[in-house]
Image: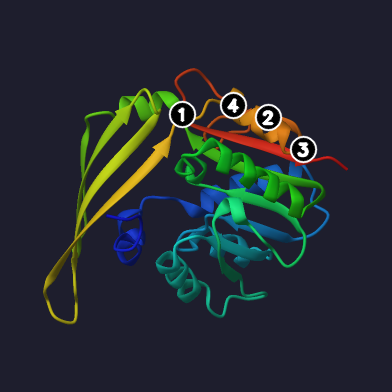
Amino acid sequence: MSSYDFLAGCYDRLTYDVDYAAWADYIEKHFAQFPLTGKTVLDLACGTGSLTRELALRGYEMIGVDQSPEMLAEAADKNRGIAPIEPIFLCQSMEKLDLYGTIDACVCCLDSVNYVTDPKKLARAFQRVHLFLMPGGLFLFDINSPEKLENLDGQVFLDETEDTFCVWRAEFTRRSRICSYFMDIFRLDSATGQWARGEELHRERAYTTDELTSMLNGAGFVDVRTWGELKMRPPRRGEQRIFLTARKDT
């Protein structure tokens, strides 16, 4: 079992309820609070490129990076011909980020940071983002809170559309602080009318905001702040998704 090999082809259908326009609105509120020096934005762990597309349509020069070739293939198809500037996509892991030039901001959304389960690799990823950011540039990302991941332990979920059926169960290990998602996915082939079955394993590590703040500071970031879920305020007790912003010093 591996992550996103089989899921990529039906990921958008299973995440139809994600309001990417609302996410882009929220990101732009932070851009307004920390004015960018330019319009080049990195979408780190961009997945199938839905948020990349939303921001590109708003006039940002987008770079999408993901380590899954299957997800990037979906992203490239989705963003082909986008005006005014078609996004470019690179197949890279976060900790080996290597861009052709500098960026004015970086966003990493939908708990992608949790997917980096090795803290040393995450620290290196933050260092790579800092390296390519312009002075004053903004880094924004979100996490599933430790409480949310712990509370998923033992739960079973079902996602279903007309041509996709996904059953997944979660197990949280307190010692490693990792939540594992075991997925059984059934996808209908419209050409043959046959169902195909795939298995995938996804893993997320629980990080505290203190741990992440320390990593960001260690990478050279300043002005680290935490925010509630899609809110321009500090997170409240029990909030399941937390956002963090950090800047590269001018």
Relative image position of residue 96 (x, y in whole percent): 61, 55
- Mark 3: amino acid: Gly
Residue 31 showing in the rendered view: no
Give whichever of discs 3 and 1 has the lower sequence position: 1
* Element carrying mark 2: strand
* Element carrying mark 1: loop
> Where's the N terminus, which quadrant?
bottom left
> Which residue carries the number 3 mark?
220
What residue appears at the point 57 percent right and 61 percent down from the top-left corner?
65
Query: Vertical placement of 250 versus 99: above or below?
Result: above
> Which residue carries the number 2 mark?
225
Q: Could you classify mark 2 by the number of other residues whose Cα lies within 10 Å: few (under 14), some (14-19), or many (20 or more)?
A: some
- Mark 2: amino acid: Arg
Q: Residue 15 or 220: which is nearer the viewer?
A: 220
- Mark 4: amino acid: Glu
> Which residue carries the number 4 mark?
211
The numbered disc on residue 145 is: 1
- Mark 1: amino acid: Ser
What residue appears at the point 64 percent right and 65 percent down from the top-left corner?
62
Q: Residue 151 or 123: which is nearer the viewer?
A: 123
Relative image position of residue 124 (x, y in whole percent): 63, 44
Give whichever of discs 4 and 3 has the lower sequence position: 4
Relative image position of residue 3 (x, y in whole percent): 35, 55
* Element carrying mark 4: helix
Tally of numbered discs: 4
Residue 231 showing in the rendered view: yes
Q: Quadrant of residue 234?
A: top right
Give whichever of discs 3 and 2 has the lower sequence position: 3
In the rendered structure, the answer to whether residue 92 lies left or right of residue 29 reads left
